[in-house]
Amino acid sequence: MSDTTVPILKGLRFPKTIDLSKGPAAFTVAVDTEDASAISEVTFTLDRPVIHLQFGEGYPGRSISIDGYYNNGDTFTDGTPYIAANTITLGTNTSAGTYTFSAVNVWDVAGNLCTYYTSDLHNLGIGQTFTVTGTKADQTGGILTGLSMQPTVDLSKDLRCSMPALAPLIMPVATVSPM
């Protein structure tokens, strides 16, 4: 019989504060789970991006993953199929402030998924936030100081080939003219 039971998140461990005043800082996120078979992966989605340092480079991202392949630490494939951890290094360009786990996805090896949102974590008594301090990141938002556009945009042409990144946003409607 195949496993059709969703995995259960029993616990989540991470530091409450990550201090970047002395430079990049490593921290560990660990999970305790339960399942009928075994866990394959847990991903954490943050409410805003952090700067992950990986291979000497800084990458902005809103997710942290614990799986059996790319961890910097304990995996689900090491004889403890329900407990695992990953060590993440944050760069000093990570913005200071409070970060919230907006979702935690737990997959088992049978492909069953259970998503825990912030309110679910709260109801389970599992912490949802950590604070980053001591950063050198730019704390001010960008300011739009100008914008230039062609007075008329011809939407009758198929722009998806010339601007593939904008393809999902392009809908042939009508000619747009300035007011």
Image (cartoon, grey):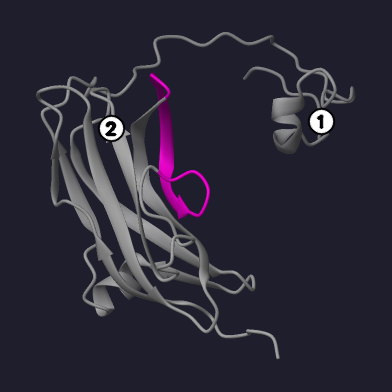
Disc 2, SS: strand
Q: Residue 156 at what x, y percent from top left?
A: 89, 25
Mark 1: which amino acid? Ala
6 with respect to 4 (left or right) = left
Looking at the image, the residue that sits furthest to the front is 79
Position of residue 66 relative to residue 40, above or below, is above
Q: Is residue 41 above or below residue 119?
A: above
The front one of 134 and 108 is 108
Residue at 53 percent of width and 80 percent of height: 6
Label 1: few (<14), some or many (≥20) within 10 Å? few
Could you say which quadrant of the image residue 17 lies in? top left
48 or 151: nearer the viewer: 48
Residue 175 lies, in percent from the top left, at 80, 24
Q: Amino acid at mark 2?
A: Leu
Residue toward you, 120 or 8: 8
Q: CA distance from mark 1 to mark 2?
A: 46 Å
Tell me which residue sits at (36%, 32%) in the image: 52
Q: Is residue 170 left or right of residue 138?
A: right
Quarter holding the N terminus is bottom right
Quarter of the rendering containing residue 160: top right
**Stretch in magenta:** 55-71
Q: Is residue 70 magenta?
A: yes
Residue picked out by circle 2: 90
Q: Which residue is found at the position 64% from the left and 70% from the top?
A: 111
Camera-side mark, 1 or 2: 2
Picture disc at residue 174: 1
Specify few, some or many for label 2: CA neighbours under 10 Å numbering under 14, 14-19, or 20 or more.
many
Residue 76 belongs to the span the image colors magenta:
no
Picture residue at 29% right of the left edge, 34% below the top = 89
Badge 1 marks a residue whose secondary structure is loop
